[in-house]
Amino acid sequence: MKLFYSAASPFVRKVMACAIARDLDERITLIPTNPQDSPPDLIAANPLSLIPCLVTEDGMALFDSPVICEYLDSREGGIPLFPHTAAARWIALRRQAMADGIMDAAVMRRGEGQRPVEAARTALMARRKAAIDRTIAALEADVPHQTLDIGTIAIGCALGYLDFRFPHEPWRPAAPKLAAWFAAFSEHPCMARTVPKG
């Protein structure tokens, strides 16, 4: 398998954390990619020119981190990250959606923050920040267990991305229970080995 990736992407981190948790990381060749450059190899695999993009052993290209993570989870061996029982599955998928929403908003804020200031853009950035804050509050009100599944991995990646890109906007004071959960969850090898750097 090969993965088009950027080490700074929280969605790539989610995919790699799942690969590590499923003992598949050694079977993935990493291809450093800047999707903004629309490199031909990436476009051939993913016409959206987005990362992460996984090309399977049989040449099928998969994109969007939930799809890639579910594919990795479908491989034999390892602990299941997508629970099979109805209640646990929907909780994990809901948490993944919440975390992906945080990551979407944070990635957009990061990109927009590097452009000239305009009133409309400032209002949009504030809306995204409010969405992140509300979701952090919702997670604080319902802190997950230390179970390793797609929902908790996604939450860990989202909180890690906030630390990485927005250290000047600390989220922990408003979410002490979530902060304690994150500190413990970050010890999982799949999280510890994928901490963003730079």
Image (cartoon, rainbow, N blue to C red):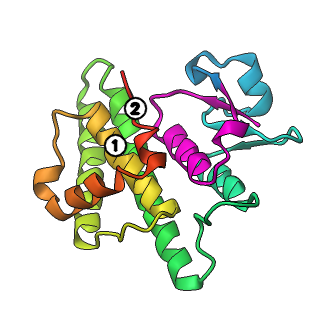
Quarter the C terminus occupies:
top left
State how far apart marks 2 and 1 are (Cα): 8 Å
Q: Residue 142 appears at what percent x and percent y? A: 28, 73
Q: Is residue 64 magenta?
A: no
- Examine the rendered structure and indicate whether residue 33 appears above or below residue 174: above
Label 2 packing within 10 angstroms: few (<14), some (14-19), many (20+): some
Residue 99 vs residue 157, the one in the foreground? 157
Instruction: Say whether residue 181 is left or right of residue 157.
Output: left
- Examine the rendered structure and indicate whether residue 36 appears above or below residue 128: above
What amino acid is found at the position of numbered circle 1 in the picture?
Gly
Residue at figure coordinates x 74%, y 26% from the top left: 43
Q: Residue 185 appears at what percent x and percent y? A: 35, 56
Residue 86 appears in the figure: yes
Please tell me whether mark 1 sits on a helix, a strand or a loop.
Answer: helix
Q: Which residue is mark 2?
A: 196
Please tell me whether mark 2 sits on a helix, a strand or a loop.
Answer: loop
Residue 142 vs residue 72, the one in the foreground? 72
Q: Quadrant of the rendered structure where residue 121 is?
A: top left
Q: Are marks 2 and 1 in contact (CB under 8 Å)?
A: yes
Instruction: Say whether residue 73 is left or right of residue 89.
Output: right
Quarter the N terminus occupies:
top right
- Examine the rendered structure and indicate whether residue 168 appears above or below residue 18: above
What amino acid is found at the position of numbered circle 2 in the picture?
Pro
Label 1 packing within 10 angstroms: few (<14), some (14-19), many (20+): many
Q: Residue 195 appears at what percent x and percent y? A: 40, 36
Residue at figure coordinates x 19%, y 64% from the top left: 177
Which range of residues does the magenta coloring cover? 1-30
Instruction: Say whether residue 44 is left or right of residue 28.
Output: right
Residue 102 appears in the figure: no
Q: First in sequence, mark 2 or 1: give its number.
A: 1
Q: Which residue is mark 1?
A: 160
Q: Residue 89 appears at what percent x and percent y? A: 55, 75
